Image (cartoon, rainbow, N blue to C red):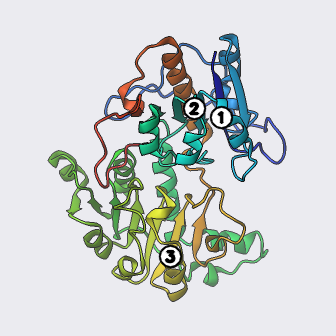
Amino acid sequence: MAKILAVLYPDPVGGYPPDYARDEIPTITGYPGGQTAPTPQAIDFAPGHLLGCVSGELGLRRFLEDRGHTLVVTSDKEGADSALDRELPDADVVVSQPFWPAYLTAERIAAAPRLRLAITAGIGSDHVDLPSAIAHGMTVAEVTFSNSISVSEHAVMQILTLVHNYLPAHEWVTARKGWNIADSVSRAYDLEGMDVGVLGSGRIGKAVLRRLKPFDVTLHYCDVHRLPKEVEEELELTWHPDARSLASAVDVLSIHTPLHPQTQNLFDDELIGAMKRGSYIVNTARALIVNRDAVVRALDSGQLAGYAGDVWYPQPPPPDHPWRTMPHEAMTPHVSGSTLSAQARYAAGTREILECWFDGRPIRPDYLIVEGGGLAGTGASSYTVAG
């Protein structure tokens, strides 16, 4: 029998379960392009419930214990004596989420001789040291596409929040108990007519482009793999061969590329300085794609009019992280892909992967990053996000 270690984010401060705002959520059976939603043999949770926290357990406990397996769930993942480090040496499977990642470093993998499967409940496995996983003979899988649309909706929301100066205006009627219209609108603009670009036109980036089209903006994108001609014509897209060309052409830039050596620290002082003065950046991809302090400097100087995102490094960030206090920001914790709607899908996908693993059936190729110690899948381009 196997030991499954799930590292999930803490419960709500008000206790678990919360009071849910809705009694049901729409049923999603498939995604754009034809991929089906997760299809486990069964589920032991109510779609729309909070599953990604410790008490939610991704709805896995009954399924695993009925099969004789052991499930250990914790949110304690940092520090020399964390529960993750104490429980890892005899774990067979580790499950975590990009929102509260269990960083499986080379050292942690080396300390876990039984570890054979790492599952990301969601999208993005950069918290796993993939070369070490390959050498260790591990399989690394994630629930591809489960929360891609969730992230794309969040990105569009943050674009509008920045451009329309929503948060400062909201603060005037709540925290300040005022009605200062002039202050509220002094940094507010229409998105209509602006040039808006996405870096990375994979599933999330393309979904953002489609959602922005009705706003009557001019759309731009950059990806080493150009979209089909018919898609470019349908959305009236301008393709850019590199990030600098894109950044210098747009008023708003939304980042949807994975983190790898070519994208780490890509948006530094020089690249941000090549953008139009008063541009906006939204980053729902990975925090290390931008230089932390360069963003702060650009907001302080006015080179950037606003920065929003919900990805940080590390996660969670320390209390003194400068993005918590920089001006003209609209930051959230890493929540864009963890709506209750998305949780129903990535919890189901996690169970589907585990069912296949325990039954000796193939895990669907869409979910595989590393398979049994070797690279899996078709591989992402320099900018295309797999999610």
Residue furthest right in the image:
14
Task: Give the SS element for disc 2.
Answer: loop
238 sits left or right of 332 in the view: left
User: What amino acid is found at the position of numbered circle 3 in the picture?
Assistant: Val
Which image quarter is the N terminus in?
top right
Residue under label 3: 295
Query: Above or below — where is 374 with respect to 161?
Result: above
Query: Above or below — where is 258 with respect to 142?
Result: below
Q: Tell me the distance, in whole angstroms, between the alpha carbons under discs 1 and 2.
A: 7 Å
Tell me, yes or no, whether the two marked residues, 1 and 2, touch with CB atoms within 8 Å. Answer: yes
User: Mark 1 or mark 3, which is nearer the start of the sequence?
Assistant: 1
6 sits left or right of 140 in the view: right
Residue under label 2: 113
Where does the image place residue 214, in percent across and percent down from the top left? 36, 55
User: Mark 2 or mark 3, which is nearer the start of the sequence?
Assistant: 2
Using the image, tell me which numbered label, if any, was put on residue 89. 1
Using the image, tell me which numbered label, if any, was put on residue 224. none
Q: Tell me the distance, in whole angstroms, between the alpha carbons under discs 3 and 1.
A: 39 Å
267 sits left or right of 298 in the view: left
User: What amino acid is found at the position of numbered circle 2 in the picture?
Assistant: Pro
The total number of labels drawn is 3
Residue at image location 41% in from the left, 44% down from the top: 131
User: What amino acid is found at the position of numbered circle 1 in the picture?
Assistant: Pro
Which image quarter is the C terminus in?
top left
- 91 vs 102, nearest the viewer: 91
Where does the image place residue 342, in percent across and percent down from the top left? 55, 37
